Amino acid sequence: MADYELQHLTPKAAFELIEQEPRAILVDVRSNMEFLFVGHPKGAVHIPWIDEPDWVVNPNFVRLVRELMLGGIICDGDAGCAPVILICRSGKRSVDAGNALIEAGFNEVYNVLDGFEGERDENHRRSTLGGWRFDGLPWEQC
């Protein structure tokens, strides 16, 4: 059992953490299509949690995040390990992905509440109630 728990941040608090902690990484866990065509936070690294064509959990997810962290930013003596911030569409897949990282031994993992697009409104549209894009944070589209 893990000694740490997944933590949660609002999109604005996640952006502030990224700005204040240069070692922090933002990992977008959405599918390739979402990342490319819906848009994504600027500077986010894309590692899908679940992706087409089979829509099953990526068996390499933890390994890929671990490789990313070993790129010179994982741990720094007294400063501890770099924060891993996970974002998905509405903050649900990133919880599962974050719990997998915690179980694998990561100790500072955050889920972005409301994700990139937030929940759907009464008209079944996203980005109108909450999320990274709703909060006006930097994002881009391919």
Image (cartoon, helix red, strand yellow):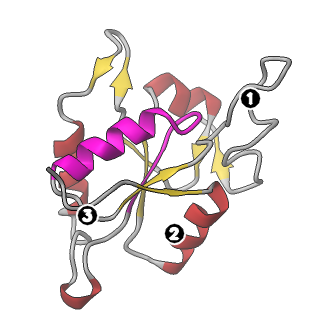
Which quadrant is home to the C terminus?
Answer: top right
Farthest residue to the right: give it. Answer: 123
Circle number at residue 126: 1
Of residue 108 and residue 72, the one placed in the foreground of this image is 108
Q: Which mark is in front, 1 or 3? A: 3
Residue 80 location (% of width, % of height) = 25, 80
Whether the magenta-drawn stretch holds residue 101 is answered as yes
Q: Regarding mark 1 in the picture, which secondary structure is present there?
A: loop
Circle number at residue 107: 3
User: What residue lies at 45% left-to-right and 77% top-to-bottom?
Assistant: 21
Amino acid type at mark 3:
Asn
Whether the magenta-drawn stretch holds residue 52 is answered as no
Whole-number angstrom distance, CA of label 1 to CA of label 3: 31 Å
Q: Which residue is mark 2?
A: 18
Q: Regarding mark 2 in the picture, which secondary structure is present there?
A: helix
Dot 1 and dot 3 residues touching (CB under 8 Å): no
88 vs 76, left or right, is: right
Of residue 35 and residue 18, the one placed in the foreground of this image is 18
